[in-house]
Amino acid sequence: MLAYCLGMSSIILHSDLNNFYASVERRLNPELVGVPLAVCGSREERHGIVLAKSEEAKRRGVKTGDTIWQAKRKCPGIIIVPPRFGEYMKYSRKVRAVYARYTDLIESYGIDECWLDITNTLAVFPRYAGDKTGEDGEYTDDYLRFLGDTIRFAVKDELGLTVSVGVSFNKIFAKLGSDLKKPDGTSVISPSNYKNVVYGLPVEDLLMVGDATSAKLRAMGCNTIGDLAAADDGRIISAFGKFGATLLTYARGQDVTPVAHMDAERELKSIGNSQTYAADLVYIEQVERNIYVLAESVAARLRESGRGLADTVHLWVRYGDMTSFTVQKKVRHTVLCGEIARTAIELFKANVRPPFAVRSLGVTVSGFDGGSSQLTLDETCGNYSRREKVERTIDDIRKKHGYASIQRGILIDDVDGMHNDIKNSHLIKPARFEDREGDEDDGKV
């Protein structure tokens, strides 16, 4: 039974800094307080989209992902400022320092979000005047709200930033709770109220349910989280595989994933890079060259990571009209640029028909083997090992003489591509683009 009986259940908080980039800009420049504000990427490099916006801009319809011209059309007079990621990281660390006074179980979910497990550290919180537990021995919702408010007020008083907090008995519902009262609020999803609070919400409000998953669930009659929770296990798992079992666990409040320690190194799940181009790519030859440039950076980072070989290649494509899609394909375990690039090109050709106008491309690999895979006879005869040695030698040459010192033939007529060292020049920038549009600062680093 899910219950907040003393010593039995977890108390998990999810904190989400409100309009984080914009809020930091206002701390650095108080003249921006109270005016519509948007933090946007470089217009010259065609990263000119809204990364964060103030509440004033949000009320005028400005959304994360809007282009600068769209934001100005929706909100005449909006102030546009460039991002300062160094400052955002600095404030992110300051916020985590506040959290660390209450618990050392702090798991980041990007630059502006964290989970906190305070189950065993309640003694460090201020004295609570009311009843902590009810007649059934469970913690009261009022006490749980007090715990969330304590941390929320500390961040606001000390750093001038507002945070929305969700308090629950697992990470999934805690994150869901932090979205319910924005900005600057605390929501409690407890064992006694979770069905009333959660089950009527749209299914896409659940973590990991984006547009594609939502459409598929709704086609199956699962319009709300409650519908999903009540669905037949076999039907959902048949439609989604292992991911379906995860969705059911999340919807039913049965997730027991622990909050990691603040010093724990998060397991690297994927390695990827993306780029937005100065002009739309309209020829397949342009796409192929740029996929190779991306694959070079991804393969080099994979070799450096020590995670072994990867067995899945992902391709992300964004068009000039800002629509996008992501596809993936299983491959034999590899660390070779050529194999990653060829797979990504195959995915592009299978999913895109000319004419096209590609604004951005991204290549990612996942499914790491940790160095445990054994080469087959076919792979050995196919000189896989020799090709890997060649690519590692290229890595060494580039470290010593520069990225452009040695290049693939496909880039011989592309001067920009030959000097496009994405691996070493890639800036920290928001990268959590799920298959639904984010409503707040969705930056991940």
Image: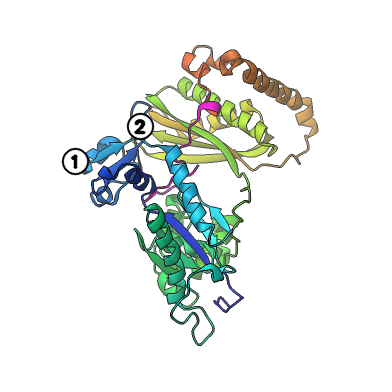
Q: Is residue 70 above or below residue 164?
A: above
Q: Is residue 416 above or below residue 382?
A: above
Point out the stretch of residues depicted in magenta.
424-445
Q: Which mark is residue 152?
A: none
Q: Earlier in the sequence, mark 1 or mark 2?
A: 1
Between residues 144 and 3, which one lies in front from this camera angle? 144
Q: Residues within 10 Å of mark 1 (few under 14, many from 20)?
A: few
Q: Is residue 8 above or below residue 248?
A: below
Q: Which residue is mark 1?
A: 76
Q: Residues within 10 Å of mark 2 (few under 14, many from 20)?
A: some
Tell whether position 440 is magenta: yes
- Badges 1 and 2: C-beta atoms under 8 Å apart? no
Residue 258 position within the rendered picture, expressed as x and y whole percent measured from the top left: 61, 61
Q: Tag 1's secondary structure?
A: loop
Task: Please report the residue visible at 65 percent of the width from the left and 22 percent of the height from the top.
Answer: 395
Residue 324 in which image quadrant: top left
Between residues 337 and 176, which one lies in front from this camera angle? 176
Instruction: Tell whether 269 sits left or right of 306.
Output: left
Residue 60 position within the rendered picture, expressed as x and y whole percent measured from the top left: 23, 49
Q: Is residue 125 above or below residue 74?
A: below
Residue 179 position within the rendered picture, expressed as x and y whole percent measured from the top left: 40, 60
User: What is the residue that sits farthest to the top in this orientation?
Assistant: 413
Q: Which residue is mark 2?
A: 320
Disc 1 from disc 2: Cα separation: 24 Å
User: What is the residue that sits farthest to the bottom in this orientation?
Assistant: 135
Q: Amino acid at mark 1?
A: Pro
Task: Please report the residue visible at 43 percent of the width from the left and 38 percent of the height from the top.
Answer: 85
